[in-house]
Image (tube, grey):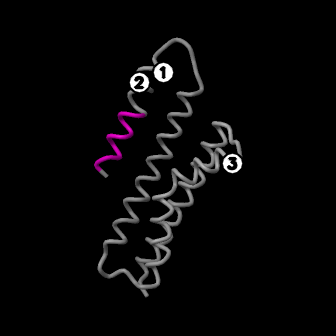
Amino acid sequence: MGWAPAELVMSRCIPLWVGARGIEFDWKYVQMSIDSNISLVHYVAVAALVWMFSRYDLPARLRLPLAALLGLSLYKAFLLEVAVHVLALGPWAALGAKAGLSALLGLGALGLFVALGHGP
């Protein structure tokens, strides 16, 4: 989790702070803000998945779905870039695809967390 705040500050907060202060309005700053929120959801979901994966009392039935979600989180950027190029998505559609994939990852992590809490 150490790189997540640094990545958000350097790649999103500083350009937003510097660029959005002007008189003119540009939609790219709204997109950057939404992208920051999507990235935050992604980082929280990945932190929850790593925490669950590191538990010694993780039931065997949850190992495969947990590993699949961790693999999805690792290849998320690659899958999104392939989808953008193959489907010729625009910037808003690409942002929607990123939000959908992050929501899928977050809901999957939440489902596994609930299943882990209820036990066998």
The span shown in magenta is: 2-11
Label pair 2/1, CB-CB below 8 angstroms: yes
Give the total number of marks visible in the rendering: 3
Mark 1 highlights which residue?
A: 20
Front disc: 2 or 3: 3
- Among the two numbered marks 2 and 3 on one chain, the one whose residue lies closer to the N terminus: 2
Q: Name which quarter of the figure residue 47 lies in.
A: bottom left
The residue furthest right is 87
Label pair 2/3, CB-CB below 8 angstroms: no
Identify whether 52 is placed above or below 38. below
Label pair 1/3, CB-CB below 8 angstroms: no
Identify whether 38 is placed above or below 12. below
Residue type pointed to by label 1: Ala
Residue type pointed to by label 3: Val
Mark 3 highlights which residue?
A: 86
Residue 99 position in % (x across, y down)? 57, 49
Identify whether 112 is placed above or below 104. below
Residue 6 magenta-highlighted: yes
Residue type pointed to by label 2: Trp
Q: Give the alpha-carbon distance from disc 1 to disc 3, as whole Å.
A: 32 Å
Q: Give the alpha-carbon distance from disc 2 to disc 3, as whole Å.
A: 33 Å
Residue 19 magenta-highlighted: no
Label 2 element class: helix
Q: Which mark is residue 17?
A: 2
The residue depicted at 43 percent of the width and 71 percent of the height is 113
Position of 87 compared to 43: left or right? right
The residue depicted at 47 percent of the width and 77 percent of the height is 115
The residue depicted at 56 percent of the width and 60 percent of the height is 104
Of residues 4 and 40, the one nearer the viewer is 4
The residue depicted at 45 percent of the width and 27 percent of the height is 16
